[in-house]
Amino acid sequence: MRLTRGRYFAFLLLALIGASACRPRVRPVPSPEFPDVHGYFIQAGVFSLETHAAGLTRSLKNRSVPAFYFAHASGFFKVWIGRYASREIAERAARALLADGVIREFFVIEGMAFAAAAPASAGTESRLRRDLVETARSFLDYPYAWGGASAREGFDCSGLTMTVYQLNGLNMPRSIYDQYESGRAVAIDRLSAGDLVFFATGGDEKVSHVGIYIGDGRFIHAPGTNKTIRVDSLANSYFRIRIIGARGYLGDF
C-alpha cells in the first residue's frame, strides 16, 4: 500500500512514542497533521474513541485554534493544541482559551519530553505513570478551592486527583471516599508513581485528604484553604503520622 504524506507522519509518531506491548484498545490511526514535536503543547482532551477526539479537534479548528489529535501508545486518543516556544507562552494561551470557554481543561506538556519519555521496550503502564506525574506537576502553584476540580476555579484534593486521571483517559471517581474504596491497596513501601496516598487529617481514622505519589517519597497535593498545589514528603512528621493507606488503579480501569 502506498504511504500518503499523512500516513507517513502517523507512523513516524508511533515510532517516536513506542508501540504498546499490551493489547490495543483502539485502532492506532493518528491525525495526519502531527507537527514537529519540538516545543510545548496544550493537551485539551483524552478519548477512548477516535471519533470523539476528531470531533473536539474539528470544533477547535472551526474556532481557528491550531488543534490536532493522535493515537497515544496507551490506546487513547489525545488532543493537543500548539506548538509554543516556551511553557510560559503555552500556559498563557491555555488560560486565555479556558477563560473564553473554548476548552474545559488542559495541561501543558513538552513535546520532545513526551516523545522520548518511553522507549519501544517500555510498557504502557510505565508510560502512563509518567504521564500522570507530568500532569500533576503541571498544576503546581494552582490555588486550592474547596469543591474545585478545574484549572479555571482551582482544586481541592480529590478534585486534583480526579482531574489528573481524567486528563489521561482514566475514570477516577470525584469523591475522596469513592477514590479510596475503588482503588487496590498498596503498601506504603511499595508505592509507584501515579498511586494515590490517603490521610486522616481530622483527628480520627476517617480518610480526609489525598495526594498523588510522584516517587522518592514525595507526593503532589492541594493542601488547603489559602494554599497552593505543592510537593510534600511522606517523611514529613505531619503526614507520616496521618497517612492511613495508599491505592493503585492502573489495570482496574
Image: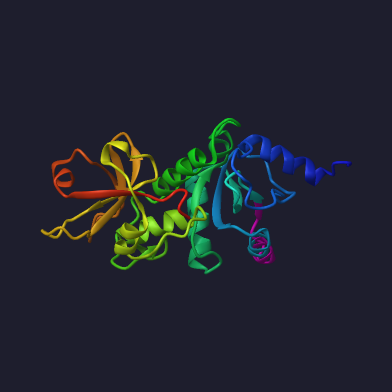
Q: Position of residue 82 (x, y in %)?
A: 61, 50
Q: Residue furthest right?
A: 2
Q: Residue furthest left?
A: 203
Q: Position of residue 71 (x, y in %)?
A: 65, 49
Q: Position of residue 197 (x, y in %)?
A: 29, 49
Q: Going 45% across and 53% down the picture, which residue do you hit?
A: 252
Q: Give the residues in magenta.
A: 57-69
Q: Is residue 61 magenta?
A: yes
Q: Going 68% across and 62% down the picture, which residue do you hit?
A: 51
Q: Is residue 161 magenta?
A: no
Q: Position of residue 213 (x, y in %)?
A: 33, 44
Q: Going 52% across and 50% down the picture, which residue do you hit?
A: 90
- Pick whichever, 152 or 209, lies toward us: 209
Tell me which corner region of the image, top left, top right, bottom left or bottom right, holds residue 46. bottom right
Q: Going 50% across and 52% down the picture, which residue do you hit?
A: 168
Q: Is residue 233 above or below residue 30?
A: above
158 relative to 234 in the view: left or right: right
> Can see residue 226?
no
- Pick whichever, 12 or 187, lies toward us: 187
Task: Name the quarter where the N terminus is drawn.
Answer: top right
Q: Which colour style is shown? A: rainbow
157 relative to 63 in the view: left or right: left
Tell me which corner region of the image, top left, top right, bottom left or bottom right, holds residue 142. bottom left
- Pick whichever, 163 or 176, lies toward us: 176
- Pick whichever, 162 or 61, lies toward us: 162
